Image (cartoon, helix red, strand yellow):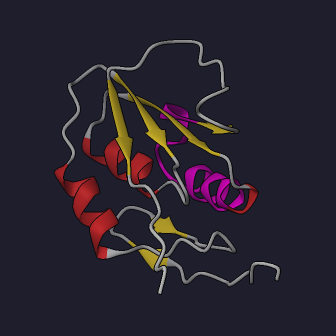
Amino acid sequence: MKDKIVQTKSFNFKQFSIYGGQSGMPVSTDGVLLGAWVSITPKSSALDIGTGTGLLALMAAQRFTDISISAIDIDPHAIEAATINIEQSPWQDRITLHNGSVLTTDFPKKFDAIICNPPYFNSG
């Protein structure tokens, strides 16, 4: 049985929007709360593992104006949505998007912080 591709609803914040596309990752309360809660040291670099639509990377870029962020995802639908969201944001110059596995990607630098909101699946 093939996975069903579903169009995910878009979500608007004050300074940016999240286009969900076919990522299957809607903006949720837990993701927004995590993005509001995370604390990153000024003038540092962060890695967003499993970025999905780019929500955490964008929220971090908005809150911390002097950090650089690398965001990575292995899912092509997520990368498509994240690319659109990052390119349409005012912070595209501080977010670098990587398509691939965090386990095999050779990042050009080390990171001061790691953020991640891993997906969860209902098994029932």
Looking at the magenta stretch, what is its main secondary structure? helix
Given the current orientation, which residue lies at the most extreme top position? 109
Q: Residue at x 58, y 33 (%)?
A: 102
Given the current orientation, which residue lies at the most extreme front position? 124
- Compared across the picture, whether 8 is left or right of 114 comes to right
In the foreground, 3 or 78: 3
Image location of residue 73, percent across then percent down: 61, 46
In the image, residue 72 sits, relative to residue 59, either above or below, namely: above
Quadrant in which the N terminus is drawn: bottom right
Q: Quadrant of residue 84?
A: bottom right
Examine the structure image and report whether residue 88 is included in the region drawn in magenta: yes
Q: Residue at x 37, y 62 (%)?
A: 15
Q: Residue at x 67, y 47 (%)?
A: 74
In the foreground, 104 or 93: 104
In the foreground, 120 or 116: 120
In the image, residue 46 sits, relative to residue 117, either above or below, namely: above
Q: Quadrant of residue 69?
A: top left
- Compared across the picture, whether 116 is left or right of 24 comes to left
Task: Please state the extent of the stretch shown in magenta in the rendering.
Answer: 78-96
In the image, residue 123 sits, relative to residue 113, either above or below, namely: below
State how many labels appear: 0
Examine the structure image and report whether residue 41 is included in the region drawn in magenta: no
Image location of residue 54, percent across then percent down: 51, 54
Q: Residue at x 49, y 79 (%)?
A: 123
- Compared across the picture, whether 28 is left or right of 124 comes to left
Q: Quadrant of residue 29?
A: bottom left
Image location of residue 91, percent across then percent down: 47, 43
Image location of residue 87, percent across then percent down: 62, 50
